[in-house]
Image: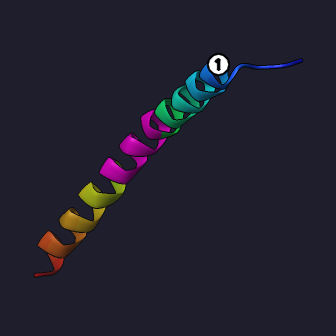
């Protein structure tokens, strides 16, 4: 199966988008937890 560079690029973009889509909420939750923790500690 041969992909043109354009198709490969599209697939990479989609993969990057999916990773961002999955990681962003996790990072947001982690940051929120850290901020809440620091807020309670201080």
Residue depicted at 57% across the width and 22% down the height: 10
State the extent of the magenta-drawn residues as a range: 20-28
Residue depicted at 71% across the width and 19% down the height: 4
Residue at the farthest bottom position: 42
Residue 13 vs residue 23, the one in the foreground? 13
Q: Is residue 15 above or below residue 31?
A: above
In the image: residue 24, left or right of residue 5: left
Query: Which x, y percent locates residue 31?
Result: 28, 59
In the image: residue 26, left or right of residue 8: left
**Residue marked by disc 1:** 7
Residue 40 vs residue 4, the one in the foreground? 4
User: Is label 1 in a helix, a strand or a loop?
Assistant: helix
Q: Is residue 8 above or below residue 39?
A: above
Q: Is residue 18 above or below residue 10?
A: below
Query: Which x, y percent locates residue 37?
Result: 24, 70
- In which quarter of the view is residue 7 placed? top right
Q: Quadrant of the C terminus?
A: bottom left
Number of disc labels: 1
In the image: residue 37, left or right of residue 2: left
Residue at the farthest front position: 5
Query: Which x, y percent locates residue 27?
Result: 37, 52
- In which quarter of the view is residue 36 placed? bottom left
Check residue 39 for magenta coloring.
no
Q: Quadrant of the N terminus?
A: top right
């Amino acid at each position: 199966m041969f992909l043109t560079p354009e198709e490969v690029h599209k697939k990479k973009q989609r993969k990057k988008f999916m990773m961002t889509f999955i990681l962003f909420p996790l990072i947001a939750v982690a940051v929120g937890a850290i901020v809440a923790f620091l807020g309670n500690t201080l």
